[in-house]
Image (cartoon, helix red, strand yellow):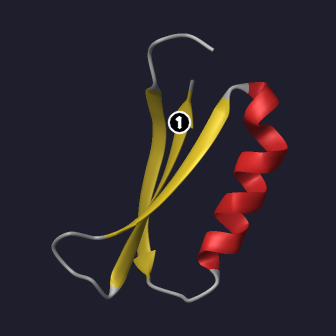
Amino acid sequence: MSDQIEVMATTRFKAANDVYKIVDTLNRTLKDDDLMFGLALDEKDPDYMVFTIYRT
């Protein structure tokens, strides 16, 4: 992995309880392809989540 992390895409959607399971599975499955996935609550509206795809 390089020292730089590139944001490839970001999307915002209504919060759901089990979305973290999908993000965890993506991270475990695609880490060897230099991809990383993030999930966070939207700082402006906690009813929404932000999903981000990174290239590492």
**Element at label 1:** strand
Q: Position of residue 24 (x, y in %)?
A: 69, 60
Q: Residue furthest top?
A: 2
Crowding near pointer 1: few (<14 within 10 Å), some, many (20+)? some
| Residue 46 image offset from top left, x and y in percent | 27, 83
Find disc 1 in the rendering and name its residue: 54
Rendered-image quadrant of the C terminus:
top right
Residue 55 vertical position relative to residue 22 in the rendered view, above or below: above
Q: Viewer-proximal residue, 11 or 43?
A: 43
Relative placement, left or right, of 54 versus 22 is: left
On screen, residue 37 versus residue 3, left or right, reads right
> Residue 53, image x and y in percent?
54, 44
Q: Residue at 56% across / 89% down in the picture?
A: 17
**Residue situated furthest left in the rendering:** 44
Which image quadrant for residue 14?
bottom left
Residue 13 located left or right of residue 29: left
Name the spot of residue 38 as percent of width and height, x first.
Answer: 51, 53
- Residue found 71% across the figure and 67% down from its top: 22
Most foreground residue, 10 or 56: 56
Measured along the vertical axis of the image, is residue 2 above or below residue 30? above
39 relative to 13, above or below:
above
Q: Quadrant of the N terminus?
A: top right
* Dot 1 amino acid type: Tyr
Rendered image quadrant of residue 33: top right
Name the residue at 65% across, 61% down.
23
